[in-house]
Image: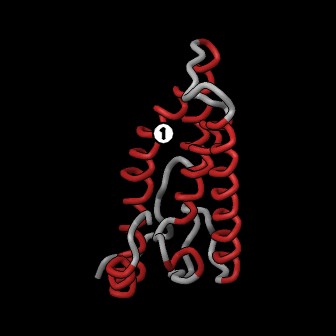
Amino acid sequence: MTEIPRAAGVGVPPPVVFLGGLILGGIVNFFFSTPIWPGIWVQLLGVMILVVGLSLFATTFRTLGRHKTSPEPWEPTTELVQDGPYRFSRNPMYLSFALMYLGLSCVFNSLPALVLFVPVMMVVDRRQILREERYLEVKFDGEYRDYTLRVRRWV
């Protein structure tokens, strides 16, 4: 029998990974101003993407609260949540962070921040999500495997 770890064991809080990419992109953009696209349209698109990301974050946070399980991956998961946004994505919290990141990159019209989105997502996908999935598979066994067959990792 496999011992169930206390939590997923994620080292760096996921919001820090996203924020770090945005800050680094902002610093590069400050010294080497490189817009994504000239004009205001990219910024308007960014606001819309940001609003969607914030809405998804709020909905996900409320859903976890209803189930009395922590959104923090370093805390124990008390229940395998499968309703609300978890019906469509196994990682709606990360999806909301990704949308907010993209939205802010567009709002600030920062190509460096947008380019850094790729390595940020690679870190999140390989270092954060994979650890959480291993933890959930051990903790919830067949129930989690069934869930992964029905619901995709991202969308």
Q: Residue at x 40, y 53 (%)?
A: 125
Q: Residue at x 67, y 51 (%)?
A: 48
Mark 1 is surrounded, within 10 Å at the Cα level, by few (under 14), some (14 to 19) or many (20 or more) other residues, namely many
User: In the image, 100: left or right of 152?
Assistant: right
The quadrant in which residue 28 appears is top right
The one of 2 and 148 positioned closer to us in this rendering = 148
Locate residue 55, reporting x and y percent.
Answer: 69, 63
* Tag 1 residue: 117
The quadrant in which residue 154 appears is bottom left
Relative to 1, is 37 above or below? above
User: In the image, 147: left or right of 43?
Assistant: left
Quadrant in which the N terminus is drawn: bottom left
Locate residue 89, reporting x and y percent.
Answer: 47, 70
Locate residue 65, reporting x and y percent.
Answer: 70, 76
Q: Residue at x 62, y 51 (%)?
A: 49
- The colour scheme of the drawn protein is secondary structure
Q: Residue at x 69, y 42 (%)?
A: 44
